[in-house]
Amino acid sequence: MALVKPHNRWIIVASYLLALMLSVFPLFYEARWLRPEFLALFVIFWAIRLPQQLSLLWVFLAGCWLDVLEGVVLGQHALALVLVAYLALLVHKRMQHYVSWQQLLVVMAIIAVHQLLDNWIHSFQGGAAANLDFLMPAFISALLWPLVREGLDRLRNRFRVT
């Protein structure tokens, strides 16, 4: 059995950089709970499509970069994103066979776990959300999942990322 040599893996890192830029794009204060978790969505996509190429080190570093950009405790997003990658790797074979609405539910559940962990760590600093508004990005991200999946699939096919 011949091993497949990785090809155009830089697209994965470039997509993480795009997700980082989208994650810190300025929004007005009232919309802060409506921002999708772009980096988590991209990590889920690459974990499902190319699980053998997913680098937890790159996921951790991207999470650290997001921590620095948002000015939160170093490792807060990094830990949550590694957990997202782990959960996505656990279900990656099943996700490829799910229809869109089932994928939406799985993505929403994974990102909800991300938000719960993120809010829990944030609560140690005294800044936890008073209600369940912090779970709204999981819902918004799940609604964007078909667009993200289609866009990254086209990018993956165009550049033949393997």
Image (cartoon, rainbow, N blue to C red):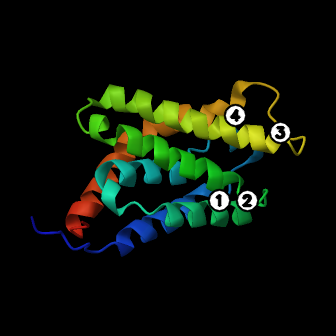
Which comes before the other along the chain, label 2 or label 1? 1
Q: Position of residue 68 (x, y in %)?
A: 73, 66
Q: Amino acid at mark 3?
A: Ser
Distance from disc 1 to disc 4, alpha carbons, whole Å, reads 17 Å
Q: Amino acid at mark 4?
A: Phe
Provide residue 15's location: percent of width, then percent of height.
43, 64
Point 43% across, 27% down: residue: 105
Relative to 84, does residue 75 appear above or below in the rendering? below
Residue occupied by mark 4: 134
Which of label 3 and label 1 is nearer to you? 3
Q: Please name the residue that numbered disc 2 is placed on.
A: 70
* Marks 2 and 1 in Cβ contact (< 8 Å): yes
Instruction: Give the number of the mark in front: 1 or 4.
Output: 4
The circle drawn on residue 24 is 1
SS of the residue under disc 3: helix
Disc 3 + disc 2, Cβ < 8 Å: no
Q: Earlier in the sequence, mark 2 or mark 4?
A: 2
Q: Residues within 10 Å of mark 4 (few under 14, many from 20)?
A: some
What's the CA distance linking mark 3 and mark 2?
16 Å
Amino acid at pointer 1: Val
In which image quadrant can residue 60 be found? bottom right
Q: Which mark is residue 123?
A: 3
Is 123 situated left or right of 55 in this image? right
Nearer-the-camera pick, 111 or 22:
111
3D distance between C-alphas at marks 3 and 1? 21 Å
72 or 86, nearer to the observer: 86
- The answer to whether mark 3 and mark 1 are in CB contact below 8 A is no
Query: N-terminal of the two: label 3 or label 2?
Result: 2
Whether tag 2 and tag 4 are in contact, CB under 8 A, the answer is: no
